[in-house]
Amino acid sequence: MTSRNLPAALVAARDRLLEGVSRRDLRQQAAELSLRYRTVAGSHARAEEVLSYTVTRMPATYAAVSAVLDELNRRVPTFAPTSLLDLGSGPGTAAWAAVTTFETLACVTMVEEELAFRALAARLVDGHALLERATISQANLERQPELAGQYNLVTAAFMLAEISAQRLAAVIEGAWKATSDVLVLVEPGTPAGFARLRSAREQIIASGGHVIAPCPHQSACPMAGNDWCHFAVRLPRDREHRQVKGVDVPFEDEKYAYLVLARKPATAILGRVLRPPRVDKVAAAATICGKGQIEERRVLSRHRDEYRVARNWRWGDAIT
Ligand SMILES: C[S@@+](CC[C@H](N)C(=O)[O-])C[C@H]1O[C@@H](n2cnc3c(N)ncnc32)[C@H](O)[C@@H]1O
């Protein structure tokens, strides 16, 4: 499993950029950005906030993307991409996670609308041989969703949230057309993030794509009512992160929703654990998305072999 920590070279590059920068200003920018992300749909980071983003949000978005790429690795162990396209790349988060997960990558392209993020991404890759050669290009994907070329792996992390509802389908279509093998979409683990992914899922299945994860099937999503499909990853908070956020707890849990979509089907799975399971001496119980429906499964400890497997279920696991 890939480490959930930001790579050491990235932290070193970030820390060089932080030299001489007022932590008070960073803290204020981080707080304003966090408030806007939570309260204003579609909000973007402003130019003066991008450095604070690398301290307070990038560790979490990196951890979520690397958890998803690990799942892609488990689902399709033979996948060995050589080309990556990262859409709405910001400071290069998903590109860093992808090159750390897939050593086969030889060519990286990032697409980002904001100059401040492109400039920051270019400085953060200092010293990373492959990422230093990355193409970091400017595009507003809402206006120009059509992309040149095709890439083995296309990622869009925490980006669809910033696309207007009217342009979402066009942006997803552009991303899918640019995908020769696998498209990875990661969003905040909120009802709104899940809703965007649910509509992307329907769109890509209708275009002939296959859902590799998290869903164990291609049927209509059975999530109903106010429920939403999401997962969580725990990540450490380093000193800078704690200082800028003004917190003491040395870790945080990032909730995320995701989709891994592919041109070809993968080996089927039987289900996906949708919430933290409850395990005691009597039974292991979990909410599982199975073949087209969500069910509560309870395995009694007297069924020893089944129980031994079930008590190790974790939230987000595939059941094979
Ligand atoms: C929340 S940040 C995520 C950055 C990075 N992918 C990550 O996971 O940390 C969203 C990024 O998408 C970019 N973005 C938003 N709308 C865009 C558009 N229409 N075209 C291109 N980039 C866009 C923003 O500028 C920002 O860098």
Image (cartoon, rainbow, N blue to C red):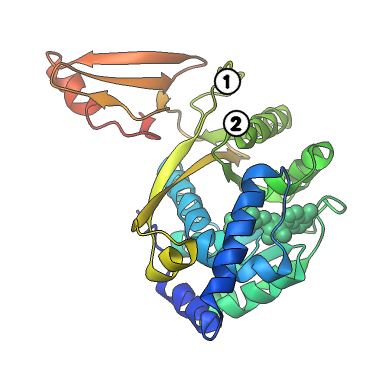
Spot occupied by residue 94 in the image (x, y as percentages of width and height)? 56, 59
Q: Is residue 156 above or below residue 227?
A: below
Task: Place residue 320 in its image quadrant.
Answer: top left
Decide: is 287 above or below 91: above
Q: Please say if the residues under marks 2 and 1 sit with CB atoms less than 8 Å apart.
A: yes
Residue 264 falls in which quadrant of the image? top right
The residue to which callout 2 is attached is 191
* Residue at the spot of label 1: 226
In terms of depth relative to the viewer, which is nearer, 103 or 282? 282
Measuring 76% from the left and 71% from the top, which residue is drawn there? 115
Crowding at dot 2, Cα within 10 Å, few <14 / some 14-19 / many 20+, comes out as some
Q: Position of residue 107 (x, y in %)?
A: 61, 68
Look at the numbered disc 2 and give the secondary structure of its residue: helix
Which residue is more in the foreground, 100 or 189? Answer: 189
Specify which label sits upstream in the sequence, 2 or 1.
Answer: 2
**SS at badge 1:** loop
